[in-house]
Amino acid sequence: MSTDQHNHSLDFLNGTPWFVFECTIELDNNSRRIALFLIYLFIFVVGLLENLVVVWVNWRRRHSANSVLFCIINVSLSDLMVIVILPFFMMEVTMDKVWLWGRFLCKVTNLVYLVNFYSSSFFLAAMTLERYLSLSRPSSAAFFPVAGRQRWVLCGGLWVLSLFLALLENVHVDILEWDEPGCYMLPEHNFTEWFVSVALIGMLFQFLVPAAVIITCNLLIARAARTAPDVEGRRDVWLVHVYSLVFVACWLPYHLVIFLMMIDDLNPYIFSCNTVEVLYFSFSVLQSLSLFHCVANPVLYNFLSRSFRNNLVNTVLNHIPRPAEQEGAASKPNGPNGGDPEKQRKISNASTSQSDVGS
């Protein structure tokens, strides 16, 4: 690069090089702050409602033999974790990255975000693998064992792995006092090495490995579903490709920008000043857009499933108080909703059936 394209002044902070550029591009930070606030607000309102409904409907069947359902509950719980901390992000955006809630909440909110960052992808990958194994080998053992203790141990292992990977970054998150206090990840030494390491770990464990499992299994599911007699035609085959597409659409732009930022840290002269400005400007926007998985997951894996919708209607009806004149009928041997109780239990446990690819 020629010196007229870059006008660098080199400074050092704790052994880490920092390059200050004179840029020509002007980006509208106020518009970005408004957009970020609206995105977070939409995800908070819609995602909170959707995931609460999913957990409410599915929680009573959490002990069923349906391992896909078990994964779906964990995905929704993971998404709820990050949704409840979004008000802190909205206020931080409103005050232009000023953090007013102390060191403890700085570290806790970042840790919650990072745990969801990993756990949501892990459980989506496990669920997709379980779908494929159940469809292709219905008589073989499930990836998530049916036995309660074994299943909870495997589930706990994924949560512990998510927590461990999150702590690798979170240990360096703290309050930094510049003009105003801010919540940042900034190690005292070797910032570039830490940033590159954390970026590579996130790219590998949160995106590349889960994406490989999700895309491969969904392609195999689609191929098997074309000849399955109990699959509802092209809609179900098309839907499994949407699962893969949504996951990639949420996370690929985010990791691509992280990768380019990592290259800029390793070689600060490789990109023009304006390119670097656009990268850092777009990072926060893409980070917020990646959280749309909290809104998309309940729709794709629950509300598009006829079995889930039936269970939602039954759950709502069971919580509606019956008029006094119907109390006698409700206590008859046939049970509520005019069905045999044991039959109702079996129908409930069959929700999100393995043969229903779109469930």
Image (spheres, helix red, strand yellow):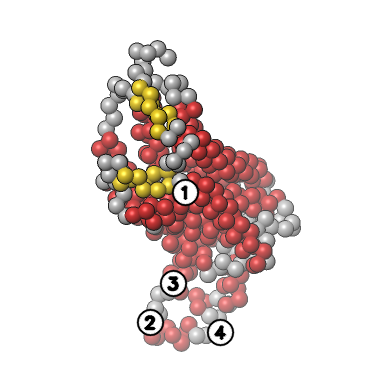
In the picture of the structure, the residue carrying the numbered disc 1 is: 170
The label shown at residue 317 is 3
Residue 24 in view, yes or no: yes
Q: Which residue is mark 4?
A: 333
Q: Are marks 3 and 2 in contact (CB under 8 Å)?
A: no
Residue 112 coordinates in the image, percent (x, y): 45, 54
Residue shown at the point (40%, 29%) measured from the top left? 12
Sequence-first disc among 1 and 2: 1
Residue type (three-letter) at the residue carrying disc 4: Pro
Which residue is found at the position 55% from the left and 41% from the top? 201
Mark 4: secondary structure: loop
Circle 4 Cα neighbour tier, 10 Å, few/some/many (<14 / 14–19 / ≥20): few
Q: Amino acid at mark 3?
A: Leu
Which residue matches tag 2?
323
Q: Nearer the viewer, mark 1 or mark 2?
A: 1
Choose top left, top right, bottom left or bottom right for residue 64: bottom right
Cα distance between the residues tagged 4 and 1: 57 Å
Q: Name the front one of labels 1 and 3.
A: 1
